[in-house]
Amino acid sequence: MRIRTMTAATAAILTVTIVGCGSGKSGESKADTANSTVAAGPNASDGTGAEKAGIPPEPTGAERDAVLAAIRDVNAHLTRDEDKALDAARNQCSSLDGGATNPDRTAAQRFSYDGVTLTDDDGSHLNTGLRRTLCPES
C-alpha cells in the first residue's frame, strides 16, 4: 500500500513539474505546450488522448527505422536514446499540424537534449524529415 501511495505521489509531482516547465517556452503555441503535457501523461501510449492531440502512434518496423534515419540525418547523437528521439518526433508532429508559430524553432528546442543543441535550420531539416516519414501533411 505504501508503494502505491508513493508511486501516485511521485507521478503527481512529475506531472506538475512537466506542466510547470513546459509553459513559457518561446516559440511554442499553447497547443505545443498542451501536446507536450499530453504525451507525458499516463495514457500517452494507449492512442486515445495522444491521437486526439495530433500525436501519431509510436512507429514500428520500417516506419520506425525511417523516422530514426531522418533524425539521425540531422545529428547522429539524437538517436542515442531511440525512445526519446521517437517521443520528440511524435510530439513534433502535433506542432506541425497544430499551428505552431515557429515549428522550426520548436523542433530545435524539442530535440536539443543530452548535450546536443540544435539551430532553427536543424529544426527545419527535422521537420522536413518528419513530414516525409511520421507526420505527412493532412
Image (cartoon, grey):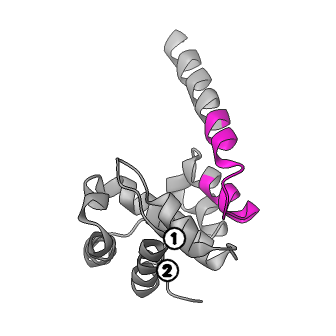
Check the picture and name the quadrant holding the N terminus.
Answer: top right
Foreground pick, 72 / 124: 124
Tag 2 and tag 1, C-beta contact below 8 Å: yes
Q: Secondary structure at mark 1?
A: loop
- Crowding around mark 1 (Cα neighbors within 10 Å: few <14, some 14 to 19, many 20+) is many
Question: Can you see residue 55?
Answer: no
Indicate the quadrant where residue 12 lies: top right
- Does residue 63 lie above or below 118 as drawn? below
Q: Quadrant of residue 50?
A: bottom right
Q: Amino acid at mark 2?
A: Cys
Q: Residue furthest top?
A: 2
Foreground mark, 2 or 1?
2
Residue 56 is tagged as: 1
Is 26 one of the magenta-colored residues?
yes
Out of 114 and 95, give the one closest to the viewer. 114
Q: Residue at x 60, y 55 (%)?
A: 36
Prevailing SS of the magenta stretch: helix
Residue 19's place in the image compared with 57, above or below, is above
For the point 50% across and 72% down, the residue is 120
Measured as percent of width and height from the top left, residue 40 is found at: 56, 48
Decide if residue 10 is on the left or right side of residue 134: right
Would you place residue 47 above or below residue 56 in this image? Answer: above
Residue 79 inside the magenta-drawn segment: no
| Nearest the eye: 93 or 46 | 93
The residue sitting at 66% across, 66% down in the picture is 53
- Of 11 and 96, nearer the camera is 96
Figure quadrant of the C terminus: bottom right
Residue 91 point in image, percent of width and height: 53, 63
Q: Which residues are magenta?
A: 16-36
Q: Amino acid at mark 1?
A: Pro
Name the spot of residue 135 as percent of width and height, x first.
Answer: 49, 80
According to the picture, the residue beneath numbered tag 2 turns out to be: 135
